[in-house]
Image (cartoon, rainbow, N blue to C red):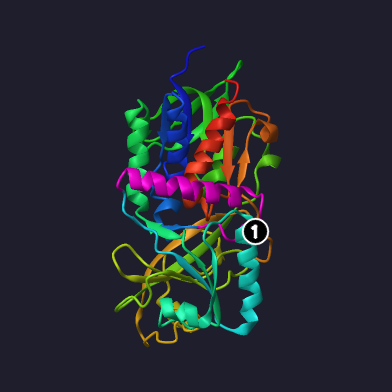
């Protein structure tokens, strides 16, 4: 039978758009559905815009593989399309002797993951690079950086549309039914409510991944992992940015922890922390400034009193709750849920932005192999 589209992607964040681009590159007609009024308004709009090297993730995991592959592809993509980015490098800092073993384990993990250019630094060597830093020892990751994530997503949208695809906003996905013989009927809400047919379906809606999967007829509930909201807030520095490189203390359980970056506008930003919440609450409690200041002074003793102002908050689509081990990305194809032509993505949190091009290629390859 004929279909309105070869492939439909739910979610126009970085990962959904990267999936749409990868499918478009293979000559497929692509529809990307976004419930918000603009692309990239969910998880992709509330992050650090950091390009991760791939240091922290278990070797052989999807996070490790996609982060390294995605980061290499991302720098090439940004440079070739003249999207603002800065390969500023990262220092992972042990502020005391007790933390040296932890950063050494990160170095070994990163080396196993194929991260290039890593270097051990003494405290004196780290301070020679960043004089205001308190460091007993450090790891330098020169491949880490920052980029304009919205410029990146606009470029992905442009490539989809240049290939004859469509990115439609204010168009919430309301459900899908698999068709006999393959393909899907997809219900689209909003002012222009309609039904479309599509041979393939990719769900990459971030925080609503579980609800979207549950709205697909025949999707087995036991294949939908439990979701949790991991909220992180950011504070901005009033005054001159103290460091050029990204500064990361050792990770905290379940996240990379509160770190420092000088954003592309030259301002210093600290965050995110991690708190599990029940609702999408993006408020930032100004009272947290003191807690942040205490943490920051471990690696920047010179932080002036009263220099932190509330900035913004983000929520990560976690697949683990408090005290539970942090799982890998989950890409569920037919072998998981039994539905031909469907790829459902769950738990695409950090380093999802860095990994997005690699995730898109993996999804497109899985759905088109042998097609």
Between 356 and 77, the one lying in front of the other is 77
**Percent x, y for residue 281?**
46, 61
Residue 266 appears at what percent x and percent y?
30, 68
- Magenta segment, prevailing SS (helix, strand or loop): helix
Q: Position of residue 53 (x, y in %)?
A: 51, 57
Span shown in magenta: 53-82
Visible in this render: residue 219? yes
In the image, taking residue 43 as reference, residue 342 lies left or right, namely right
| Label 1 neighbour load within 10 Å: few <14, some 14-19, many 20+ | some
Secondary structure beneath disc 1? loop
Quarter holding the C terminus is top right
Q: Is residue 204 visible?
A: no
Residue visible at 38% across and 36% down in the picture? 190
Magenta segment includes 78: yes
Q: Position of residue 264 (x, y in %)?
A: 32, 62
Q: Residue at x 40, y 82 (%)?
A: 131
At x 52%, y 54%, the residue is 351
Where is 213 relative to 288, above or below? above
Q: In the depicted view, which residue is nearer to us: 70 or 285? A: 70
| 228 lies left or right of 126 | right
Foreground residue, 283 or 301?
A: 301
Asked which quadrant contains residue 276, the reply is bottom right
Looking at the rendered structure, the number of numbered marks drawn on it comes to 1
Q: Does 105 lie within the magenta span?
A: no
Looking at the image, residue 293 lies above or below residue 323: below
Depth check, front residue: 53 or 43 = 53
> What is the residue that sits farthest to the top in this orientation?
1
- Residue 267 image-quadrant placement: bottom left
* Mark 1, residue position: 326
């Amino acid at each position: 039978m004929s279909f309105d589209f070869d492939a439909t992607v739910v979610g126009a964040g970085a990962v959904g758009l990267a999936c749409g681009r990868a499918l478009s590159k293979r000559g497929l007609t692509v529809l990307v559905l976004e419930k918000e009024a603009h692309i990239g308004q969910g998880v992709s709009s509330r992050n650090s815009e950091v390009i991760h090297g791939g240091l922290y993730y278990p070797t052989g995991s999807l996070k490790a593989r996609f982060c390294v592959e995605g980061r290499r592809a991302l720098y090439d993509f940004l440079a070739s399309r003249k999207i603002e980015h800065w390969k500023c490098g990262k220092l992972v800092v042990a502020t005391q002797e007790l933390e040296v073993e932890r950063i050494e384990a990160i170095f070994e993990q990163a080396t196993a993951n194929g991260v290039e250019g890593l270097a051990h630094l003494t405290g004196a060597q780290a301070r020679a690079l960043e004089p205001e830093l308190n460091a007993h020892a450090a790891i330098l990751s020169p491949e880490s950086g920052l980029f304009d994530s919205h410029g990146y997503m606009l470029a992905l949208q442009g490539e989809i549309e240049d290939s004859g695809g469509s990115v439609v906003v204010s168009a919430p996905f309301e459900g899908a039914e698999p068709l006999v013989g393959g393909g899907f009927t997809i219900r689209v809400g909003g002012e222009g409510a309609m039904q479309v047919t599509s041979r393939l379906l990719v769900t990459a809606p971030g925080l609503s991944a579980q609800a979207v999967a549950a709205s697909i007829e025949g999707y087995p509930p036991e294949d939908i992992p439990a979701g949790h909201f991991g909220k992180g807030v950011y504070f901005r520095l009033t005054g001159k940015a103290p460091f050029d490189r990204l500064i990361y203390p050792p990770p905290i359980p379940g996240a990379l922890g509160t770190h420092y970056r000088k954003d592309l506008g030259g301002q210093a930003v600290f965050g995110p922390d991690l708190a599990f919440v029940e609702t999408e609450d993006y408020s930032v409690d100004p009272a947290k400034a003191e807690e942040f200041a205490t943490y920051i002074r471990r690696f920047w003793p010179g932080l002036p009193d009263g220099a932190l102002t509330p900035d913004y908050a983000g929520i990560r689509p976690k697949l683990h709750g408090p005290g539970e081990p942090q799982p890998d990305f989950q890409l569920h194809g037919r072998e998981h849920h039994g539905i031909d032509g469907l790829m459902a993505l769950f738990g695409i949190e950090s380093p999802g932005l860095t990994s997005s091009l690699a995730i898109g290629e993996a999804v497109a390859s899985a759905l088109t192999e042998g097609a």
